[in-house]
Amino acid sequence: MQKLMAGLVVGVISIFAVSAGFALMQQMTRQFTLQSLSGNDISVEQALLVAQGAIDACKKDNSVITVAVVDHVGGVRFIVRGDGASPEMVDNARRKAYTARTFRQPTSTWMEHTAIDAVDEKGKPIDLNGQQMLENTIAQKGGIPIIWHNDAIGGVGVTGSKGGGEADEACAKAGADAISDQLF
Amino acid sequence: MSHRSLMLKAAAAAAVLMIAPQAAQAQSSGLTSEQALAAMRAVQAYAKNDGSDPSLAVIDRDGNTVLLLQGNNAAPHNLGLAQRKAFTANQFKMRSIDWRDRTKPGQPQASERETPNAIPLGGGVPIMVGNEVIGAVGVSGTKGGQEGDTAGAQAGADAAAALVKRLQAQN
C-alpha cells in the first residue's frame, strides 16, 4: 500500500514537471520566433498570429475581411482574401499594410499628417501631401505598423469590415496586438 | 384567381428558376479562404518534413489570389514564382511540371510558353474535384527542386480538394 502511494506521488510530481517543462519550452519557442530571423523581421509564424487576431476581432460583427501582413521591407509575408471579397481587395489590404510599415504609423494618422491642408502644432502648413503619390501607398484607414524597439518590422492591413475604415483599423490593431507579448 | 396574380406568380417562378443555377454556380466556383488555409497547412507540413521554408500561392479558378505566403528565408523571387506556377497549373489544367515537358522547344505546343505569366517550372498543381479544376497551388523554395515543389503543392491541392469534397458530401 505504501509502495503504491509513493508511486502515485512520484507519478503526480513527474506529470507536473513534464507539463511545466513543456510550458516553458512553448514560451521559449514563442520568444525565439522573432530572434530566429535576421534583420528584425516579422516571421511567418508571427504573421499568421497577426492575421488570426485581426480576423477574430472582425468576427464580432460577422465581418469577412481580407488581411495582409508585410515584412520589414514592405514585401508580402501573408495575405488571405475573405470569402466573396473582390480580387482587388488583396492589393488594397497589401497597400494599407505597406503604407503603415513604411511610414511607421497607423494609416489614419498618416492620412491626417499628409492631408493637403495639414498644419503643425504652430499652425504652419506641413505640406507632405506628395507622400500620398508614392507607389504602393494608399490613403485609406486600416493599416497598422508592427513596432519593435521603435522601428517597424512589418505592417498589417485590413479591408472589407462592415464598419468601414475605422473598423478595419481596429481589427488591424487587434492583429498587431496579438503578438505584442512576443516583441520585447 | 385573377389574371394579374397568375402573371405575378409565373414571373416569380421564372425568377426563382433563373436565380437557382446562378447560386449553385457561385457556390461551386469560389475557393474559400478555409480551403486555401488547409492547402497552406498541408504545404507547411510537407516543408517541415523536408526541413525547408517555401513560399506559396493559392489562386481560384479565375486566377485571382486567395492566399499568399512568403517563407521566412525566401529569396525575393520565390513568392512571385509561386504565383506564376499556380497560374500555369490553373490556366492549362495540369501540373506545371507536365506543362513544362509538354512545351519543350521542338514540341508542337512549344509556343504555349509565350503565354504571359505562365512559367515552365515544376511546383504548380491544379486543385481537382473530379475532373474539374477549381484553382491551383504554387510552391517555390522546397529542398527537392522542381520535384520537391511539385510534391509540396500536390499535398496542398489534395488538402483543399478534400475539404471541397467533404462540403459536397454534406450537401
Image: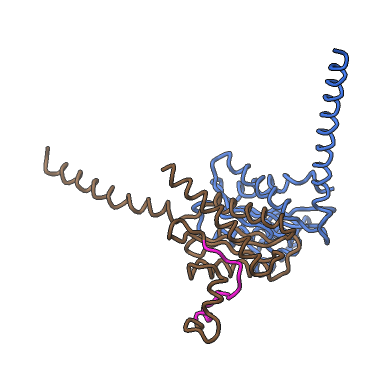
Q: How is the image coloured?
A: by chain
| Chain coloured brown in this rendering | B
Position of A7 with respect to B32 (left or right) is right
- Residue A151 percent across, percent down from the top left: 81, 57
The quarter of the image holding the N terminus of chain B is top left
On screen, A64 above or below A73? above
For the image, the number of numbered tags is 0
Which region shows up in magenta?
B112-126
In magenta segment, residue A157: no
For the stretch drawn in magenta, what is the main secondary structure? Answer: loop
On screen, A163 above or below A119? above
- Residue A152 percent across, percent down from the top left: 78, 57
Q: Residue furthest bottom?
A: B106
Residue at x 43% of width, y 60% of height: B131
Q: Nearer the viewer, residue A76 or B2?
A: A76
In magenta segment, residue B124: yes
Can I make out residue A139 in this image? no
- Residue B54 percent across, percent down from the top left: 69, 62
Position of B117 with respect to B61 (left or right) is right
The quarter of the image holding the C terminus of chain B is top left
Can I make out residue A29 in this image? yes
| Chain coloured blue in this rendering | A
- Residue B74 percent across, percent down from the top left: 73, 65
Q: Quadrant of residue A106?
A: bottom right
Residue at x 71% of width, y 55% of height: B49
Q: Nearer the viewer, residue A103 or A66?
A: A66
Residue at x 82% of width, y 55% of height: A36
